[in-house]
């Protein structure tokens, strides 16, 4: 699903919650929706993760050479969470 369809099917409150879970803002997603910004591959993957595949990285960034499959991001820390440094 692309961002236009996602925005059409979900409330602003729900989209804002998805944005926060993915480490971005509703305003940034709107900018991506209207073509004013191009999201990173990392954000596309996070959005796929937090929407349980409703949005897919391949559809959000079809210009990128995605591998046939890539590992789930469930084991990756949230972008807003900093990891402790290892001595």
Image (cartoon, rainbow, N blue to C red):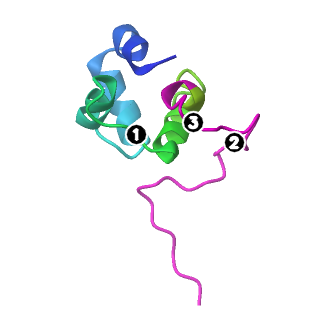
Tell me which segment is drawn in magenta.
Answer: 59-87
Q: Residue at x 59, y 90 (%)?
A: 87
The answer to whether marks 2 and 1 mark residues whose Cβ atoms lie closer than 8 Å is no
Q: Position of residue 47 (x, y in %)?
A: 49, 34
- Residue bearing mark 2: 72
Q: Against 79, is 25 above or below? A: above
Task: Looking at the image, tell me whether mark 1 or mark 3 is earlier in sequence order.
Answer: 1
Q: Position of residue 84 (x, y in %)?
A: 51, 76
The secondary structure type at the circle numbered 1 is loop
Of circles 1 and 3, the one toward us is 1
- Residue bearing mark 1: 39
Q: Against 21, is 34 above or below? A: above
* Location of residue 17 (image quadrant): top left
Q: Position of residue 34 (x, y in %)?
A: 27, 23
Task: Looking at the image, tell me whether mark 2 or mark 1 is earlier in sequence order.
Answer: 1
Badge 2: residue crowd in 10 Å (few <14, some 14–19, many ≥20): few
State whether the magenta stretch is mostly helix, strand or loop.
Answer: loop
Task: Looking at the image, tell me whether mark 3 or mark 2 is earlier in sequence order.
Answer: 3
Q: Which mark is residue 49?
A: 3
Judged left or right of residue 8, residue 67 is: right
* Location of residue 40 (image quadrant): top left
The secondary structure type at the circle numbered 3 is helix
The secondary structure type at the circle numbered 2 is loop
Badge 1: residue crowd in 10 Å (few <14, some 14–19, many ≥20): some
Q: Position of residue 38 (x, y in %)?
A: 37, 37
**In whole angstroms, how far apart are the C-alphas of marks 1 and 3?**
15 Å
Q: Residue at x 35, y 23 (%)?
A: 14
The answer to whether marks 3 and 2 mark residues whose Cβ atoms lie closer than 8 Å is yes
Of circles 2 and 1, the one toward us is 1
């Amino acid at each position: 699903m692309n961002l236009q369809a996602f925005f059409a099917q979900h409330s602003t409150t729900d989209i804002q919650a998805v944005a926060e879970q993915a480490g971005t803002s509703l305003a940034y997603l709107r900018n991506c929706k209207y073509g004013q910004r191009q999201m990173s591959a990392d954000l596309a993957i996070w959005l796929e993760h937090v929407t349980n595949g409703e949005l897919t990285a391949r559809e959000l960034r079809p210009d990128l050479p995605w591998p046939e499959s890539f590992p789930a991001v469930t084991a990756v820390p949230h972008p807003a969470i900093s990891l402790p440094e290892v001595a």
